[in-house]
Amino acid sequence: MTDEAVTVYVEPGCPFAAKLRTKMVLARVPHRAVRFADDPEGAAAVRAHHPEGFEVSPTVVVGGGYLTNPSLREVREAMAAR
């Protein structure tokens, strides 16, 4: 993981990812957005953590934990737990 506290894997045009990222920006949650296509290793890790092997947008990585389409509250809880 980089210096950013949270990585958000996204698919361009995904309304769920856009909504979560807007909430994160407004709440000043430090994060970086990464397109699946731009990070093949990250995309493979997301697929490995999904029960059916999908790339779900958004998938949020916090401290090595993976959250699929989480709420802002879930992201904050994961950040507090790490």
Image (cartoon, grey):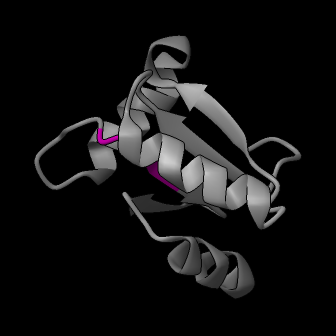
Q: Position of residue 35 (x, y in %)?
A: 52, 23
Q: Is residue 73 left or right of residue 37?
A: right
Q: Quadrant of residue 6?
A: bottom right
Q: Quadrant of residue 1?
A: top right
Which region shows up in magenta?
56-60
Viewer-side residue, 70 vs 26: 26
Q: Position of residue 2 (x, y in %)?
A: 81, 41
Q: Quadrant of the C terminus?
A: bottom right
Q: Is residue 59 magenta?
A: yes
Give the mark count: 0
Q: Is residue 38 above or below residue 10?
A: above
**Residue 22 visible somewhere in the drawing:** yes
Q: Is residue 76 magenta?
A: no
Q: Is residue 75 above or below residue 80?
A: above
Viewer-side residue, 42 vs 8: 8
| Residue at far right of view | 3
**Residue 58 visible somewhere in the drawing:** no
Q: Quadrant of residue 51?
A: bottom left
Magenta part, dominant SS: loop
Q: Is residue 75 left or right of residue 51?
A: right
Q: Position of residue 38 (x, y in %)?
A: 55, 13
Residue at x-position 29% and y-position 43%: 48
Q: Position of residue 25 (x, y in %)?
A: 76, 53
